[in-house]
Amino acid sequence: MNKTARFLSLAAVAAFASFGAQADEADASQYAAKFETNRTRAEVMAEAATVAQTSGAIPSGSRALVYSSTADRSAVSAQAVDAVRAGKISSGEVGSL
């Protein structure tokens, strides 16, 4: 009787553990957004064509600004040396921690 009770309890534990071990897809597709649209492919392609004509290939936020400096290179270098000596800016890789 002891062996039967042990076997049944072991079977119950195994059955209970198997319910928690149900796996889903590895790519987490159960969390993917579901879209339902009523637009046709032709409408979307037409809109994409008009947007491409009105905007450039490079986003405006990623364009580099053109700046021409009037400062002399040696003057800027001298100001940096003075600032390091005065302790206004740190020097080296670590700096002031």
Image (spheres, rainbow, N blue to C red):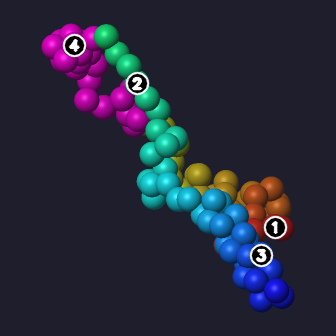
Q: Nearer the viewer, residue 51 or 89?
A: 51
The disc label shown at residue 35, or none: 2
Residue 13 location in percent, x, y? Answer: 73, 71
Residue 49 location in percent, x, y? Answer: 18, 16
The secondary structure type at the circle numbered 4 is loop
**Lateral position of residue 74 relative to residue 96, left or right:** left
Q: Amino acid at mark 4?
A: Thr
Q: Which residue is labeled 3 in the image?
A: 9
Mark before the other along the chain sequence, 4 or 1: 4
Mark 2–mark 1 distance (CA, rounded to whole Å) = 53 Å
Mark before the other along the chain sequence, 2 or 1: 2
Mark before the other along the chain sequence, 2 or 4: 2
Relative to 43, say whether 84 is above or below.
Answer: below
- Which residues are the magenta region? 39-66
Q: Amino acid at mark 2?
A: Phe
Residue shown at 82% from the left, 86% from the top: 1
Magenta highlight on residue 56: yes
* Quarter of the image with the C terminus in it: bottom right
Q: Which residue is labeled 1 in the image?
A: 96
Q: Residues within 10 Å of mark 3 (few under 14, many from 20)?
A: few
Are the residues at dot 4 and dot 3 in contact (C-beta closer than 8 Å)? no
Where, by quadrant of the figure, is residue 83 drawn? bottom right
* Front: mark 1 or 3: 3
Q: Which residue is labeled 4 in the image?
A: 40
Mark 1–mark 3 distance (CA, rounded to whole Å) = 65 Å
